């Protein structure tokens, strides 16, 4: 026991080294797990309560409806990753009508910060998959998994709580856990450096996988002070706010990221040679996608209601602007907007009824999303305009 404890503590010291280097080390011999120092009794009890609440609130599957279950996890204890996991969960829940079918796990926000979510430990992560698999219909439903953290050159997504936990989630770990759970149709999204390693293991007809970077590239925007990484910001906070398919949203996000990274590279190039010599050149992250046709068909059904709500919301916002004499560019004709809004609202109501949502429920969802479009317009004018314009064609 003493020898094993000493070895465990030595491994912990290795894996908990600060910075990206932690993602390069694997003290677990390729297995999915973590070296962990126990929480205090009070903290451990709270984590159990949080996890039990998260698992217990999952709504059951509805026969005849493509229900979506969402699992998001921030694996590194810095605020940017928890912010990204929680905000992405909210956007995914709206897009996939999954508010009561969503679990958020987190490594926390740093020392002394009280937990809001269950810890993103290997056991909790697998327990979430196990519970989801129990309540979903694997032949009918969709699982969306989103993980965010630092990443290593070997494809490992790092798990860290500084001084307490160290480990990794590798592509084969996730594939094995999903197979063991019996989950079939998946949308896998990975926000980490070198996350392109997840493409090949998930290239199959039942999976769509999106990654923040190619297997040999870093991604950007993971500073602790940020609300989002570049990838999370572009994909969730910009592109997936609209009513396009997830693949179209990914392509839009890739263009947004390219612009941001181009600006970053231009800033680097403008620096004196002596400064550039000390700083690595910021190379394009090159986000990757693999599309399984079976999964894509299921995803289209799963997101149809949320996308219809998003279109109605953006058109409602555009119509309000037109009526007050401050139209969005190219969207000044109130009659045309009224017709498009009516069509989108009818589509949303019909889709909602098929999912057990009343017309009043759908109306409230449209109003809430329209208010969000108004809020986002202050900082994302071009993208709100683009979403509204894309919805004009139905």
Image (cartoon, helix red, strand yellow):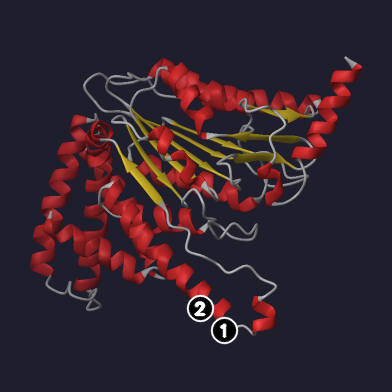
Callout 2 environment at 10 Å: few (<14), some (14 to 19), or many (20+)? few
Q: Residue at x 14, y 44 (%)?
A: 347
Report, in whole angstroms, how far the alpha carbon at label 2 lies from the one at label 1: 6 Å
Q: Quadrant of residue 2?
A: top right
**Mark carried by residue 188:** none
Q: Position of residue 367 (x, y in %)?
A: 30, 52
Q: Confirm whether residue 144 shows in the render.
A: no
* Residue 181, above or below 255: above
Quadrant placement of the C terminus: bottom left
56 or 298, nearer to the observer: 298
Residue 345 rendering spot, x and y as whole percentages: 17, 49
- What x and y, as percent, mark residue 223? 63, 59
Query: Is residue 355 found left or right of 115 in the rendered image?
Result: left
Assess disc 1: are there few (<14), some (14-19) or many (≥20) residues with their C-alpha within 10 Å of its C-alpha.
Answer: few
Which quadrant would the N terminus be assigned to in this image? top right
Q: Are marks 2 and 1 in contact (CB under 8 Å)?
A: yes
Q: Is residue 142 left or right of residue 168?
A: left
In the image, residue 34 sits, relative to residue 346, either above or below, namely above
| Vertical side of 45 occupied by 221: above or below | below
> Which residue is pictured at 73% across the width and 35% down the height?
165
- Nearest the eye: 346 or 285: 285
User: Percent from the top left, x then y, of residue 220?
Assistant: 54, 60
Residue at the spot of label 2: 266
What residue is shown at x 15% (from left), y 38% (from top)? Answer: 350
Residue 381, relative to residue 32: is it above or below? below
Is residue 281 in view from this perspective? yes
Left or right of residue 180: residue 370? left
Of the numbered discs in the image, which one, if any, rests on residue 270?
1
Which one is nearer the viewer's eye here, 184 or 176? 176
**Mark 2: secondary structure:** helix
Residue 324 falls left or right of residue 229: left
**Residue placed most toward the observer, 128 or 167:** 167
């Amino acid at each position: 026991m003493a020898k094993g404890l000493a070895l465990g503590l030595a491994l912990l010291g290795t894996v908990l080294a600060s910075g990206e280097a932690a993602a390069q080390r694997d003290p677990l011999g390729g297995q999915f797990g973590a070296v962990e120092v126990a929480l205090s009794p009070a903290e451990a009890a709270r984590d159990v309560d949080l996890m039990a609440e998260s698992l217990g609130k999952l709504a059951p599957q509805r026969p005849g409806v493509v229900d979506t279950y969402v699992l998001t996890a921030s694996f590194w204890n810095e605020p940017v990753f928890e912010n990204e996991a929680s905000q992405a969960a909210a956007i995914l829940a709206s897009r996939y009508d999954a508010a009561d079918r969503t679990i958020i796990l987190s490594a926390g926000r740093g020392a002394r910060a009280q937990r809001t979510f269950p810890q993103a430990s290997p056991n909790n992560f697998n327990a979430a998959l196990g519970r989801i698999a129990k309540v979903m219909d694997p032949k009918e439903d969709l699982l969306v998994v989103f993980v965010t953290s630092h990443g290593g050159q070997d494809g490992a997504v790092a798990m860290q709580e500084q001084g307490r936990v160290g480990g990794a989630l590798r592509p084969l770990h996730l594939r094995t856990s999903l197979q063991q759970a019996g989950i079939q149709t998946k949308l896998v999204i990975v926000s980490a450096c070198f996350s392109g390693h997840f493409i090949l293991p998930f290239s199959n007809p039942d999976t769509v996988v999106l990654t923040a970077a190619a297997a040999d590239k870093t991604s950007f925007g993971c500073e602790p002070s940020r609300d989002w990484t570049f990838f999370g910001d572009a994909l969730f906070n910009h592109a997936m706010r609209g009513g396009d398919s997830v693949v179209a949203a990914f392509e839009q996000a890739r263009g947004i990221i390219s612009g941001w990274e181009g600006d970053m590279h231009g800033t680097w190039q403008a620096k004196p040679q002596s400064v550039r010599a000390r700083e690595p050149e910021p190379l394009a992250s090159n986000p990757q996608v693999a599309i399984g046709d079976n999964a894509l068909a299921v995803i289209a059904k799963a997101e149809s209601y949320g996308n219809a709500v998003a279109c109605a919301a953006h058109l409602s916002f555009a119509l309000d602007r037109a009526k007050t004499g401050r139209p969005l560019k190219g969207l000044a004709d109130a009659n045309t907007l009224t017709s498009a809004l009516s069509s989108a609202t009818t589509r949303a109501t019909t889709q909602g009824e098929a999912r057990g949502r009343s017309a009043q429920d759908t109306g409230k969802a449209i109003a809430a999303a329209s208010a969000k479009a108004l809020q986002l317009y202050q900082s994302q004018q071009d993208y709100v305009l683009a979403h509204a314009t894309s919805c004009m064609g139905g």
